[in-house]
Image (cartoon, grey):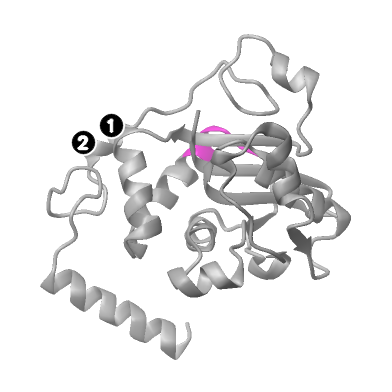
């Protein structure tokens, strides 16, 4: 542990004593995400399409048969609703970095119940301008916490965002692909012949994850799956 990291953890522990954590879902004091709110999360359950990971009695689903994803598969813990949506918002936009702990717990539990081929974790990167504004990459925090729980190594520098992109949710399908085309670049030798698990907080359309996967394949990744906290449908 670096001196800076040790100082940050000591400061965070002191702040927890002075200002006890409150649940991001309901505001109760005592934890960052309380058991009651966790029980209210709408988890994504089978039957699922083996490719896009969305509910479907057909496998692959009609959408993936017509337009197959450029990634081995996407999986999400829950839907972007209720307590999970509120927790992700606090984590992403309100500087509640400690929420990475319970949120990574959810991801780890999912992996234990639904193993995915993975020997390396790679967080979806932010553009440097966005990283400077926010001060941290929420996907990287999740990846490091998940690494501690799973034992899988993290290659945070394995993927870089070379240009900023518009929010995917406001664009049509073809515009989404054009928006992220060439926005990511894989780098480093550790990606070659690895089973990469991309980590992110939310998947809206899947096109960002596809663009990341294409950059990782170009650097020699054997397979690329993605695990996100929430799916927006």
Q: What range of the chain is rendered magenta?
A: 110-117
Q: Is residue 145 magenta?
A: no
> Does residue 45 sit above or below 178 in this rendering?
above
Label 2 vs label 1: CA separation? 5 Å
Examine the rendered structure and indicate whether residue 202 appears above or below residue 64.
Answer: below
Please say whether residue 112 is one of the residues in the magenta stretch: yes
| Residue 139 sits above or below residue 130 on the image | above
* Residue identifier under label 1: 39
Q: Is residue 168 left or right of residue 4?
A: right
Q: Position of residue 120 (x, y in %)?
A: 68, 56
Q: Is residue 219 left or right of residue 94?
A: right
Tell me which corner region of the image, top left, top right, bottom left or bottom right, holds residue 20: bottom left
Q: Is residue 112 left or right of residue 225?
A: left
Q: Considering depth in this image, is 104 or 232 the residue closer to the camera? A: 232
Q: Is residue 225 visible?
A: no
Expressed as whole percent of the image width and height from the top left, the position of residue 121 reads 64, 56
The disc placed on residue 36 is: 2
Judging depth in this view, the residue of 17 and 205 nearest the camera is 205
Few, some or many residues within 10 Å of mark 1 (<14, 14–19, 20+):
few
């Amino acid at each position: 542990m670096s001196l800076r990291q040790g100082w940050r953890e000591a400061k965070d522990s002191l702040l927890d004593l002075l200002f006890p954590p409150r649940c991001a879902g309901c505001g109760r004091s005592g934890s960052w995400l309380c058991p009651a709110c966790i029980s209210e999360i709408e988890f994504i359950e089978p039957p699922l399409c083996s490719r896009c990971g969305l509910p479907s009695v057909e496998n692959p689903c009609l959408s993936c048969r017509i337009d197959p994803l450029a990634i081995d598969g996407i999986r999400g813990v829950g839907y972007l609703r209720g307590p999970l949506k509120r927790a992700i918002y606090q984590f992403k936009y309100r500087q509640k970095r400690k929420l990475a702990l319970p949120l990574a717990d959810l991801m780890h539990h999912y992996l234990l119940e639904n193993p995915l081929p993975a020997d390396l974790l790679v967080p979806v990167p932010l553009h440097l301008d966005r990283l400077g504004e926010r001060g941290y990459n929420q996907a990287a925090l999740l990846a490091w916490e998940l690494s501690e729980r799973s034992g899988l190594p993290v290659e945070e520098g394995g993927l870089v965002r070379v240009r900023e992109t518009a929010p995917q949710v406001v664009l049509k399908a073809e515009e989404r692909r054009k928006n992220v085309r060439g926005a990511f670049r894989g780098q480093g030798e550790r990606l070659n012949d690895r089973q990469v698990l991309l980590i992110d907080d939310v998947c809206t359309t899947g096109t960002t994850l596809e663009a990341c996967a294409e950059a990782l394949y170009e650097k020699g990744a054997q397979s690329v799956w993605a695990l996100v906290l929430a799916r927006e449908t």
